[in-house]
Image: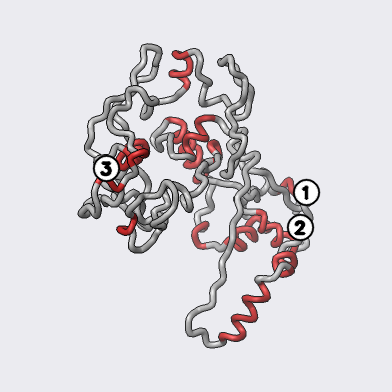
Amino acid sequence: MKTSNLLPYGLMAAAALALPALAGAATSIGIENSPHDFSLIIGSNKVSTASWNTRHGVCSPCHSAHHTDNAQIAPLWTHATTASSFTPYSSPSLNASVGQPDGVSLACLSCHDGTLAVSTAAGAPTIGVGTDLDANAKIGTDLHVTHPISFTYDTALATADGNLEDPATYKIGDPKTRLTVQTAPVPASWSGTSLTGKTIQQAMLFSGKMQWDDPEVKQAMEYFAKMLDYLNPDHADLTWDQAVKELMDGKVAFNSMGDWADGEFIKAKMKENEDFGWVNHPGTDGSFLILADGFTLAKGATHKESAIAWLRSIGTKEAPEEFKPI
């Protein structure tokens, strides 16, 4: 079987599928040992009386491990939402329309306005008082001299302002074109995933600052919906290797799969660029997704010693090299 029978080439890129037009990078650098780590009672910039966090969880003070109300202002958010009325930022030179904080900004202010205790959960009694928050971390409700938040940053705003980069086209790390300061906005030291090469819209989406009902996100999901039209009817009944076999047999035109599928072609003695080919998902240049499988020892395993020996063998450096030579 030649590649002419497989056009377009089988898609076997280790890249994200769901949002091909908006592949981006998360910007979080982690909670542990940060000022938002309430799992410890002591430490600089920590809540002074964190004894309420009896489970010493890192995420549980603000998040649930499972489904929460869809109306919550942040994913899996369990903290109570402030009812404060805020004085928004204002400036005669501001072109954006700034209203009351919403979304993730409101989630932050639900602690930092100082009206709710850090330990106040949604629909649950308060444990502690508002003074649980360090006084230096209180922003209050007057935001008129801080910085504008909760406004729409789009192409229209950039055009109206004249000094803002277009968030749909400007890529982080590129030379500035509209400001007298030409230094690209890339931190000198950054422990999170690099945002260089991503547009401002991509960076805002994956750091939670672009709403999921944004037109750009909707367009990406429309593209994804069109991709679903190409699915074979029995796709849900196939394992990934069975799906690759469908491609080998010429029953499907392409297969969206990680690069581990290469092993199936090698096993079938098929040659790259002769019997099959591959391309990256459009819009994912520079992105790479790592998938890891975990193996555990079942409690009360019948053949415990054999299971341990097997786990030890696959945990060696040689095992993955034998499975998938580089």
For disc 1, the marked residue is 273
Amino acid under disc 1: Asn
Taking the image as shown, residue 283 lies to the left or right of residue 116, namely right
Instruction: Tell me, yes or no, whether the two marked residues, 1 and 3, touch with CB atoms within 8 Å.
Output: no
x, y percentage for residue 163? 51, 15
Q: Nearer the viewer, mark 1 or mark 3?
A: 3
Of callouts 3 and 2, the N-terminal one: 3
Residue that badge 2 annotates: 326
What residue is shown at x 55% (from left), y 30% (from top)? 199
Residue 245 horizontal/vertical position (percent): 65, 61
Residue at (41% x, 55% y) in the render = 42
Q: How many other residues sit within 10 Å of disc 3, few (<14), some (14-19) or many (≥20)?
A: many
Element carrying mark 2: loop
**Is residue 159 at all visible to an observer of this figure?**
yes
User: Residue drawn 63% across and 47% down?
Assistant: 288
Q: Is residue 24 above or below residue 52?
A: above
Q: Secondary structure at mark 1?
A: loop
Which image quarter: residue 311? bottom right
Residue underneath mark 3: 81
Q: Quadrant of residue 115?
A: top left
